[in-house]
Image (cartoon, grey):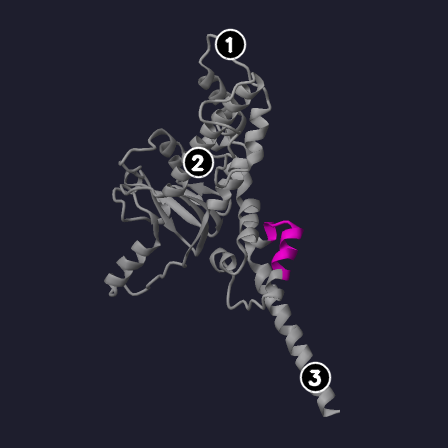
């Protein structure tokens, strides 16, 4: 009887722990925005890998405990629609934007510490600095998507000083679903090889704990470089196919080479190659193909 009761008590405690873990996960605001299928996958992954949640869940500790594929699916569901409204991303294909989602990195900023005693002036200054996410006059290194939390933006034009902010001078409030630093997208494409930095004309300050997914400058440059590689591969493959149709083999090519571009689905090349884009004899062939490829898949 004692063993039976002890076993029952152990099972009840185990069930209570599981329910508490489930509750912690479901309290995470972005989790509620995911599809039921993806929510189920996350729960199953947690149980299978005996992942124990301690305290609050945030995007950083969640993604660090999941497989890369599952993490990428989460980032895609949370951010794909938002990216489709960003600058030149508006004309990019969904396939390409999925690759952009894969490059997003989690960044969590803790809740700013408020010191009620003015005497601790050093700590107050440090706390203010720690809560600054983007500082006016400093380089912008990333575009951020807010998943949870609140921030405010202001500039020295509003306050007379970039280091001083009051409730009255807060210009805009940023919250979940908002983006900042999106001007980086156009700047990187317009200035791909420039050593200059894009400078912020506003300061952004965290008001609460903030969870973001960010696209850094280096990742954005890699995406644009990848775009160029895909276009080059497309042009090369199409020339080979055209030569083959005419019964000719390009010099140095006995067979069609395998074209591999890391991170890009090969079907992208096949679709465009088989689309049969034709150019006038007097038209520059490369310009015609590049224009078609860009309009179909990028910008």
Task: Please check the rendered image and state whether residue 228 is part of the magenta-colored stretch, yes or no.
Answer: no
Residue that numbered label 2 is attached to: 226
Q: CA distance from mark 3 to mark 1?
A: 81 Å
Residue that numbered label 1 is attached to: 280
Task: Please check the rendered image and state whether residue 39 is part of the magenta-colored stretch, yes or no.
Answer: yes
Q: Looking at this view, name the residue that lies furthest to the top.
A: 282
Q: Position of residue 235 (x, y in %)?
A: 48, 25
Q: Position of residue 29 (x, y in %)?
A: 55, 54
* Dot 2 alpha-carbon crowd within 10 angstroms: few under 14, some 14 to 19, many 20 or more: some
Q: In the image shown, does 255 or 223 lie closer to the viewer?
A: 255
| 2 with respect to 170 (left or right) | right
The local secondary structure at tag 1 comes to: loop
* Dot 3 alpha-carbon crowd within 10 angstroms: few under 14, some 14 to 19, many 20 or more: few
Q: In the image shown, does 230 or 296 lie closer to the viewer?
A: 230
Residue 159 badge: none
Q: In the figure, 191 relative to 206: above or below? A: above
Residue that numbered label 3 is attached to: 7
Of labels 3 and 1, the one closer to you: 1
Location of residue 117 (image quadrant): bottom left
What residue is at 36 percent from the left and 33 percent from the top?
A: 187
Instruction: Look at the image and give the residue range highlighted in magenta.
Output: 32-44
Q: In the image shown, does 176 or 295 lie closer to the viewer?
A: 295
Q: Looking at this view, name the residue that lies furthest to the bottom.
A: 2
What residue is at 47 percent from the left and 34 percent from the top?
A: 86
Q: CA distance from mark 2 to mark 1?
A: 28 Å
């Amino acid at each position: 009887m004692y063993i039976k009761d002890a076993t029952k008590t152990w099972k009840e405690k185990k069930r209570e722990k599981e329910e508490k873990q489930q509750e912690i996960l479901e309290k995470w605001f972005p989790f509620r925005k995911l599809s039921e299928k993806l929510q189920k996958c996350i729960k199953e992954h947690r149980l299978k890998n005996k992942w124990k949640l301690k305290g609050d869940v945030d995007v950083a500790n969640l993604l660090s405990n999941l497989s890369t594929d599952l993490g990428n699916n989460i980032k895609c569901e949370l951010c794909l629609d938002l990216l489709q409204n960003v600058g030149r991303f508006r004309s990019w294909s969904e396939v390409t934007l999925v690759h952009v989602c894969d490059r997003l990195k989690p960044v969590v900023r803790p809740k700013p510490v408020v010191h009620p005693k003015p005497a601790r002036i050093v700590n107050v200054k440090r706390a203010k600095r720690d809560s600054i996410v983007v500082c006016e006059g400093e380089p912008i290194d990333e575009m951020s998507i807010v998943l949870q939390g609140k921030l405010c933006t202001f500039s020295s034009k509003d306050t007379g000083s970039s280091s001083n902010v009051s409730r009255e001078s807060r210009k805009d409030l940023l919250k979940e679903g908002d983006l900042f630093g999106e001007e980086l997208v156009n700047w990187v494409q317009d200035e791909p090889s420039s050593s200059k930095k894009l400078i912020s004309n506003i300061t952004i300050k965290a008001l609460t704990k903030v969870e973001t997914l960010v696209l850094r400058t280096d990742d954005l440059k890699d995406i644009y470089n990848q775009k160029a590689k895909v276009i080059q591969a497309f042009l090369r493959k199409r020339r080979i196919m055209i030569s083959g149709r005419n019964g000719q083999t390009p010099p140095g090519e006995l067979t069609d080479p395998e074209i591999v571009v890391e991170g890009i689905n090969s079907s992208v090349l096949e679709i465009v190659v088989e689309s049969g884009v034709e150019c006038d004899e007097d038209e520059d062939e490369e310009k015609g193909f590049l224009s078609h490829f860009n309009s179909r898949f990028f910008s």
